[in-house]
Amino acid sequence: MDTNRPFVTWPQNLIIPPASRRVRTPVDGADVKVVSDLVPTVAISPTWPQRGVTTYGTLPYSNVTDGRAAFASWIYQNIEGDREHPDFTRLNFAPDLSASSTTPYDTMWTSEVVSWPSVLEFFKDFRNPNAPVGVSTSSGTKYIPRFTVVYGLRRSVTGHSKMRIRKFVSNTPFSLDGKVFKMFMPTDIMWDMPGTTGSIERCLHKLIKVRSARDNLDWAVDTPRYMVFPSTELEDWAPITWWECNMVDVLYTMDEYKIYPPPRLQASIYVE
């Protein structure tokens, strides 16, 4: 606070109160200061001050004799009233933080308990000529091909995973355009068709097609040749990223959280 600042007269003949300038550090951990000062409310107009354009150095009483030079280039952020001086309005200024909006002012590492779902690493079905399936028909028992399924499944894991937190600060709100949050959405796989039946526990997986022996049965014309299971949004473990944006005082912050998957375990092989 500038306790030695002299009175300054504006063209409107209003006396600027002494010690009107205030400097604060609003964002914890960020070496970013905000300076505010009083101007007569009658000086405020639709065209002045302009956010992101008006600088502290352009205030009519700015000079280099009382320490204002350090803030001269700081840009106007917003406006607020002042209860102690009802005829005045307080303007807030901050340094240009365009570089800080893309470069974190702090990076930290921690851990978070995460459940990583099972992952279907491979899936293969094939005709098994040594084990046909007997099906009752109007003309007696008919034997159709059996389809055997072999798949590899990496089991789910729950435990502490590394998490990186990056913190950003800006003069303007952060945009989340282009930032997509993806979460694991495992699904069950179950099938029951002529010649094959089976299931796989809930997991992440690519597009799965399970064949049937429909063409070998006259009465099964309405049975699909395949059962199709669309791929999950994420087909495998991958870093999970999300963002939290806030307004702190007159500045804007964004925290980026990124959790990294654990080392991959070896898949187990199963036959259906």
Image: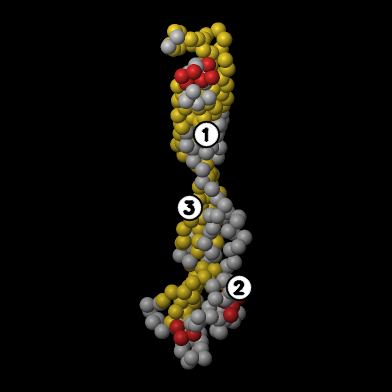
In the picture of the structure, the residue carrying the numbered disc 3 is 244
Front label number (1 vs 3): 1
In the picture of the structure, the residue carrying the numbered disc 1 is 230
Residue 251 in the image, given as x and y percentages of width and height: 50, 64
Circles 2, 3 touching at the beta carbon (< 8 Å): no
Distance from Cα at disc 2 to Cα at disc 1: 56 Å
Q: Is residue 270 visible?
A: no
**Which numbered disc, 1 or 3, marks the residue that appears first in the sequence?**
1
Secondary structure at badge 3 equals: strand
In the picture of the structure, the residue carrying the numbered disc 2 is 73
Distance from Cα at disc 1 to Cα at disc 3: 31 Å
Q: Which residue is rendered at x = 46% and y = 88% of the image?
A: 15
Secondary structure at badge 1 equals: loop
Residue 57 versus residue 104 in the image, above or below: below
Label 3 neighbour load within 10 Å: few <14, some 14-19, many 20+: few
Q: Which residue is rendered at x = 60% and y = 55% of the image?
A: 103
